């Protein structure tokens, strides 16, 4: 079962309004809607999270540490 977003409103065996997200069980219907330009498939959330991890764990650039003031 995959999730799809409607690019425009339509009705029939599956009905959606523009911008709505819905799971479509019938892959044949989903492929017909994609081919007609009514919907686009959404990626599952698991790969998105995997892509976010490298961005968060990006190594920081090494830099100079501030000099400590001596008590002279």
Image (spheres, rainbow, N blue to C red):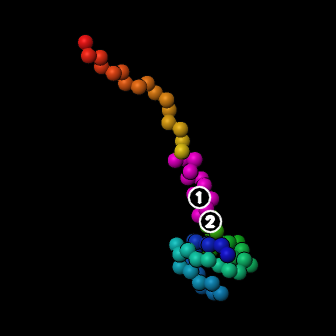
Look at the image and tell me whether residue 34 can be seen: yes
Residue at image location 54% in from the left, 45% down from the top? 57
Q: Which residue, given by chain and number where applicable, does mark 1 sit on? A: 48
In the figure, 29 relative to 68: above or below? below
Per the rendered image, the range of residues in magenta is: 44-56
**Residue farthest along the bottom direction in this orientation:** 13
| Residue 20 point in image, percent of width and height | 53, 75
In the figure, 68 relative to 17: above or below? above
The one nearer the camera, 28 or 52, is 52
Give the left or right position of residue 60, taking residue 67 as reference. Answer: right
Give the left or right position of residue 58, taking residue 28 as reference. Answer: left
| Residue 33 point in image, percent of width and height | 67, 76
Secondary-structure class at tag 2: loop
| Residue 1 point in image, percent of width and height | 67, 75
Residue at image location 36% in from the left, 21% down from the top? 67
**Residue farthest along the left direction in this orientation:** 72
Residue at image location 62% in from the left, 59% down from the top? 47
Please tell me whether residue 57 belongs to the stretch shown in magenta: no
The one nearer the camera, 50 or 65, is 65
In the figure, 2 relative to 70: above or below? below
Q: Which residue, given by chain and number where applicable, does mark 2 sit on? A: 44
Residue 46 in which image quadrant: bottom right
Secondary-structure class at tag 1: helix
Look at the image and tell me whether residue 29 can be seen: no
**Residue farthest along the top direction in this orientation:** 72
Residue at image location 61% in from the left, 72% down from the top? 4
Give the left or right position of residue 31, taking residue 9 as reference. Answer: right
Q: Are marks 1 and 2 in contact (CB under 8 Å)?
A: yes
Residue 71 in which image quadrant: top left
In the figure, 49 relative to 26: above or below? above
């Amino acid at each position: 079962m995959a999730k799809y977003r409607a690019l425009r409103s339509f009705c029939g065996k599956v009905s959606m309004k523009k911008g709505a997200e819905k799971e479509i069980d019938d892959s044949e219907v989903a492929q017909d809607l994609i081919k007609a330009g009514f919907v686009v498939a959404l990626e599952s959330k698991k790969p998105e999270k995997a892509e976010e991890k490298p961005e968060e764990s990006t190594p920081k650039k090494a830099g100079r540490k501030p000099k400590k003031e001596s008590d002279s």
